[in-house]
């Protein structure tokens, strides 16, 4: 049986780890190198590094910070933010990333997923989806592309891009399915509604995507207790649980999370 993964996340802005609520009101949470080393020692299965303002500001990911973080960890490192081409993917892999997460650029040009999978293997290409709940069949102010990815008769979650700033009119579940067909090897799925609330993951969203795609789904946004992680694995069809606040501020350690899950019958790497 495959073990479930616990993944701490470093949301980085201007070289510092930050954490907000529903993608706003960002507060400083520490130095990325120090936190990366801490989570490696605690037994994190992987580490996610997201340069959360790179796409919105139209700049490249902070490669030097990524290189510094990669030197502190001996677990797989996923890096995202500001990636616009397969050459960007290559640059980050050379800087120490094991996987690269794409979001805005993949929606602008889905061929990026195919080219990335072709050049580096689909196991290196993670599609990040920032999703927000909408009325079923309804449209936000985002402009749908008119394709079969639109929200009409969709799942009820809309994809946002540019660090959660821009609605797209595209259905999250449909986009996940299309992205995997294009070459994405994993889905990093964040509920914007639950992000930073610490009231639990959006299990309906996670289950909808997890049942629709044949690749691993990382659930993100909303972890406040260890039971929330248990629910994500047992009810939400998640393969991995990502968390930030509960680890950054010392509410729980990764070891405590794994021991709790192990005691409740969830297979984890101890």
Image (spheres, helix red, strand yellow):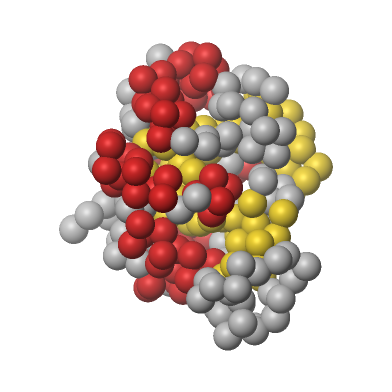
Residue 257 appears anywhere in the view: no
Report the front residue among 226 and 243.
243
The count of marks equals 0
Residue 80 image point, x, y percent? 51, 36
Residue 68 image point, x, y percent? 48, 14
Residue 42 image point, x, y percent? 42, 30
Query: In the image, is residue 249 above or below residue 242?
Result: above
182 horizontally vs 109: left or right:
left
Q: Report the residue that reaches farthest toward the left.
A: 1
Report the front residue among 12 and 240.
12
| Residue drawn at the location 76% of the way across and 34% of the way down | 27
Query: In the image, is residue 233 above or below residue 163?
Result: below
266 horizontally vs 109: left or right:
left
| Residue drawn at the location 61% of the way across and 82% of the way down | 152
Which quadrant holds the N terminus?
bottom left
Q: Quadrant of residue 163?
A: top right
Which quadrant holds the C terminus?
top left
Q: Quadrant of residue 159?
A: bottom right
Report the front residue among 270 and 204.
204
| Residue drawn at the location 73% of the way across and 43% of the way down | 20
Report the front residue among 198 and 123.
123
| Residue drawn at the location 72% of the way across and 54% of the way down | 166
Residue 112 appears anywhere in the view: yes
């Amino acid at each position: 049986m495959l073990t479930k993964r616990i993944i701490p996340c470093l949301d980085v802005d201007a070289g510092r780890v930050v954490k907000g609520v529903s993608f706003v009101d960002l507060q400083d949470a520490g130095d990325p190198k120090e936190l990366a080393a801490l989570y490696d020692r605690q037994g994190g299965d992987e580490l996610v590094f997201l340069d959360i303002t790179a796409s919105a500001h139209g700049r490249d990911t902070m490669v030097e910070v990524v290189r510094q973080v990669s030197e502190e960890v001996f677990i797989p490192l996923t890096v995202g933010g500001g990636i616009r081409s397969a050459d960007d993917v290559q640059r980050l892999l050379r800087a120490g990333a094991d996987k690269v997460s794409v979001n805005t650029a993949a929606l602008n040009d889905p061929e990026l997923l195919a080219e990335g999978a072709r050049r580096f293997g689909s196991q290196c290409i993670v599609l990040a989806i920032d999703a927000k709940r909408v009325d079923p069949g309804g449209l936000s102010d985002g402009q749908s592309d008119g394709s079969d990815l639109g929200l009409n008769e969709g799942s009820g979650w809309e994809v946002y891009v540019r660090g959660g700033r821009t609605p797209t009119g595209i259905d999250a579940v449909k986009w996940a399915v299309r992205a995997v067909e294009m070459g994405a090897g994993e889905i990093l799925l964040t509920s914007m509604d639950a992000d930073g609330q610490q009231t639990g993951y959006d299990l309906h969203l996670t289950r909808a995507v997890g049942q629709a795609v044949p690749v691993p789904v990382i659930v993100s946004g909303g972890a406040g207790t260890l039971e929330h992680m248990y629910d994500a694995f047992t009810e939400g069809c998640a393969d991995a649980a990502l968390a930030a606040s509960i680890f950054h501020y010392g509410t729980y350690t990764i070891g405590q999370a794994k021991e709790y899950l192990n005691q409740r019958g969830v297979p984890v790497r101890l």
